[in-house]
Image (tube, rainbow, N blue to C red):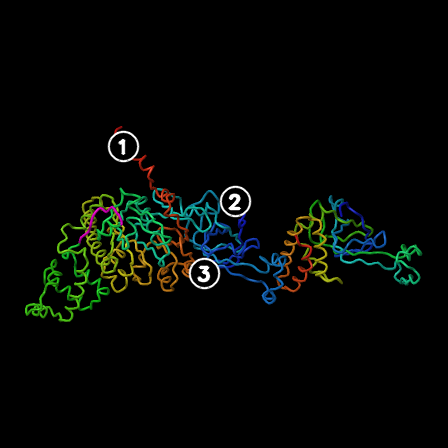
Amino acid sequence: MGEEQRVGEVIEACTTDFTAQCYELYQTPPLGSLVKTRFEAQGADSQDAWLYGIVYKAETASGDSGRRPIARGKNEQDEDEIYRASPQLLKLLKSDFSGLVVGYKSGGQIFRYLPPRPARIHGFVNLCTDEEVKQFSRTFDFLNILLKSRLEISVEELVGAALRRMGQVYGPEKHSFMVLAGKELATLLSADYAQLKTILKGLKNDAKQ
Amino acid sequence: MQNSENTLFGNKLGVVVAGSLTHGIDVRLDGTASVEDMAVGRYVTIKGQKRRFFGMITDVTLGVVDEQINVSPSDASDPFLSEVLSGTSTFGTLHVLPMLTIGAGVVGAEDAPQPVKTIPSHFSPVEVSSQRDVELVFGKEDEEKFFIGTPLDMETKICLNLAEFVKRSNGIFGKSGTGKTFLTRMLLIGMMQKSSAVNLVFDMHSEYGWEGQSENGYKVKALKQLFPDKVAVFTLDEESSRRRKVSTDAVVRIGYDEIEPEDIALLRQTLNLTEAAVQAAYQLARRYSGRKWIQTCLTLENTEETRNVLESLHIHEATFGNLRRGLESIKRLAFLSEKSGENAVDRILKYLDSGMNVVLEFGRYTDLTAYILVANLLSRRIYDQYRERTEKALGENAKPPKALVITIEEAHKFLNPAVANQTIFGTIAREMRKFNVTLLIIDQRPSGIDEEVMSQIGTKITCLLDNERDIDAVLTGVSGKNELRSVLSRLEAKQQVLIFGHSVPMPVVVRTRQYGSAESLKSFGWLGGAEKSKQVEKDIEDLWK
């Protein structure tokens, strides 16, 4: 995650989330990654207006929704042989991923709430650099958006995945990052100990010093 | 110290979340501050919006936001989970009793601490008090202030204003073996150095004048050894003093003629006298014109004449027998003599006038009869003299006599409700400073002391007490009584005292300063052998200049 790395292009966007398509099959960013794309901002800041999302879903399916893939490997020894035998598959199948919008950057400042406008279609989606992840996770206000989201993925899984991803950039400070995040969760989930416990147990292994 | 404070607790402990002026303030601890680092009796400063509040921790509790945590506590045993949960889902709460407000919040422009009349607003940050705050409240060691000890876990000096201290009667309380004697020695030294008052100590166990023994068995120097030019030791028991190699200044003898019926009345319980027998003592004293009544009573033969006398005074024969048995047991006290020869009171007064402090050792007469008799008898006469002289001073615009502090032990025997009205100590405690005489009461059973007297005590210094009634008695009339109660009963058995009342701005738990080692004694101003001889040489040189 060192260099800024382009991972896809927005093909669908609304205020709360966006879907992007990868250029290469199966090259979706990992679950919970922090990604960014441009959005339409007004005024002088429009050049440097980025919107942040957390990857909550990735999907690979046929590019044509009317044509389902069929099983092809009956006589093949190796899975990769299938793709070698039918190279068109790489073009017919598409990998998409979706990001939940958790904040934006405008005028050099990071806001951890929804941006005024959604992402642009055909906007490039980049993985955030370590430095950006650190900046974004300096406060945990975005956790509330994750906790309140209504997605196919369970909230506990999403929060856990996001924090584990972010934790990776902290190196030796990972433990204290996890503890601080945990404390924020404990405050937000003060009324639901069961949910809190599930998330914390998911973070436990990553928080080991 | 500032640094170690920072590393130990961080500075901030938590925030105010609830409270009332009467019941104290609840402070929710931050996750970083451990409940185990808190201790009742420790000071905290609350930074309100307009002023700072100075308070004392009186209770520590644990809380959870969700009862579920208590239902499945095993989950929280994981180190990561417990680290996350502490301070968030599970937290500690401090109960703080605000005592004083300091300044208007502007550091550097502080005015004197004032008693609290309000409480800090919600979410005011709470910190461990800084040295500076403690100094601001208790002042620094100076001409009048005596360094008595340090607050818990701090190095700041807590000072008692002894010039104020001696203006009221004061009490030192605590269970046996909690350090009352050490504390008293220290206070006596303090009074010698920091106030203009002189002390008269009725030293029941002969431990204030010359060296005493600590519980560990080593010897502890006392007043006369430390300040020979300021202290005179009087003794009732010359032999005992000589055996202990005490350099005494005088031997006290008391004549029968000095004993008055009031003294007998006070001894009613110890001598097992009936009320009628006490009345008989008054009657006989009147009949035999005061002075010689005891000898006369003791020598009365069982004759017709005696019976007539008793009949004329309406004294029953059995009553007389009872009184006589009592007087016989007084007579056995060897320091009593037919005639005292020299008036002990005058001699003591002469020393006191010249600014010497007097310790009266009782030697082997450690029973209460002797102690009560002598203490009461001498004090009454000294008090009379003081009264006379103060009144004269008022009338003639002359200088009043030096302020006098009388130290008595086992005070509940003098000041229990049954006799407090009769003894001179009751009077001194009540009328106190008008005549420049006050008491320093040392007692292990404060519940036995008359309430009226207790209420007049200016400063109370209490070591550990664990009897409910004793604690109640000591805390009568103090605001925040319930909170202080928990502090008082959790004092350590040694070297920790709770001080509250006239001479401290707020109740304070103090780890008392060291007393006993040569080093600690030097800090009290004692000159050890080598320095002493140097000082003497210098004094001699100065003489010839």
Q: Amino acid at mark 2?
A: Asn
Question: Which amino acid is tagged 1?
Answer: Ile
Residue ID for mark 3: B23
Viewer-nearest of discs 2 and 3? 2
Q: Position of residue B283 (x, y in %)?
A: 13, 65
Q: Chain of mark 1?
A: B
Callout 1 secondary element = helix
**Which corner quadrant of the image does residue B461 belong to?**
bottom left
Query: Residue sitting at 12 percent across and 61 percent down?
Result: B293
Q: Which sits in the foreground, B523 or A179?
A: B523
- N-terminal of the pair, mark 2 or mark 1, is 2
Residue located beneath label 1 in the image: B540
Query: Three-letter amino acid code at disc 3?
Result: His
Question: Of circles 2 and 1, which is in front?
Answer: 1
**Magenta region includes residue A82:** no
- Can you give x and y, in whole percent of width and height, for residue A125 in the image? 79, 50
Real-space CA distance between mark 2 and mark 3, rounded to the nearest whole angstrom: 33 Å
* Disc 3 element: loop
Q: Which mark is residue A181?
A: none
From the image, tell me which residue sits under label 2.
B3
Q: Viewed as shown, does residue B307 lie left or right of B134?
A: left
The residue segment tinted magenta is B244-253
